[in-house]
Image: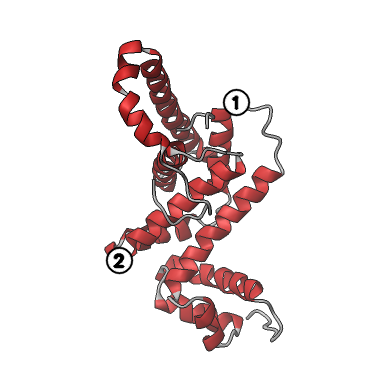
Amino acid sequence: MSDFSADSTGTDLKTQLIEAALFHVAFDGWSDVTFREAVADTGVDPVVARALFPRGALDLAVAYHQQGDSQMVAQLADTDLDQMRYRDRVAFAIRARIEAVEDREAVRRGTTLFALPMNAAQGAKLIWGTADAIWTALGDTSRDLNWYSKRATLSAVYSSTVLFWLGDDTAGAEATWAFLDRRIEDVMRFEKIKAQMKSNPLLSRLMAGPGKLAERVRAPESRGADLPGSLSGRS
């Protein structure tokens, strides 16, 4: 049982409860049983625990995912990315996010939890938040339609890579990183096609109207993860 101090901060208690929950997730998933066991293991007052995680195990799973985002952002801040091509920075960020997780079963159970219809919106919001955290950490300054399209594309790449990783038993997850490279290559190919369309006089005239409408779209002033939505470095 972990020591519980009355003057512990909310953040400390959240961390204690998450770590305690991981011992039970493999057996009971992100469930009410896991939440109760985590509370019992840490000795945290149940009322305090419920105040920190009002939805119980669901909020524990959300916090665990967000903890991984924070660890990824910290690693990116400590890494010299300037020598990498932009596509390699994105690949490195996704890999850092996946490798921030030590408990693959916790992710597997979380995937099951957020696949449930009543939790699907929360799951989509978390993936969007991860994509936003990556682009923000990489210095994305887009404020128009690109803000949404970049995050939508990266959300798809990240989520498909995680699903592949969950079933990957190759040494060092090498098959997963090869899969990631292929997904990014697909996106870069699409970006190249878009650039060719813009340079084509006829197609550029056809796209002029939609382009003007897109220019009016602006990203939220607050870069939260509330709105779901190219891996090129262009803003």
Location of residue 27 with respect to 72 vertically, above or below: below
Q: Residues within 10 Å of mark 1 (few under 14, many from 20)?
A: few
Q: How many labels does the image show?
A: 2
In the rendered structure, find residue 220 and report the number of the disc placed on it: none
Judge by depth and name the residue closer to the eye, 103 or 229.
Answer: 229
Q: Residues within 10 Å of mark 2 (few under 14, many from 20)?
A: few
Of mark 1 and mark 2, the one earlier in the sequence is: 1
Question: Which image quadrant for residue 149?
Answer: top left
Q: Mark 2 points at which residue?
A: 118
Q: Position of residue 117 (x, y in %)?
A: 27, 62
Label 1: state its secondary structure: loop
Q: Position of residue 2 (x, y in %)?
A: 65, 79
- Residue ID at (55%, 48%): 133
> Alpha-carbon distance for marks 1 and 2?
40 Å
Judge by depth and name the residue closer to the eye, 80 or 132.
Answer: 132
Seen as rendered, the residue at the extreme top is: 201
Tell whether 74 sits left or right of 217.
Answer: right
- Residue ID at (52%, 62%): 64
Q: Where is residue 222 in the image (x, y as percent from the top left)?
A: 53, 54
Label 2: state its secondary structure: helix
Location of residue 76 with respect to 16 vertically, above or below: above
Q: Mark 1 points at which residue?
A: 85
Q: What residue type is labelled 1?
A: Arg
Q: Position of residue 69 (x, y in %)?
A: 56, 53
Q: What residue type is labelled 2?
A: Met
Judge by depth and name the residue closer to the eye, 41 or 151.
Answer: 151
- Residue ID at (42%, 56%): 125
- Residue ID at (42%, 38%): 145
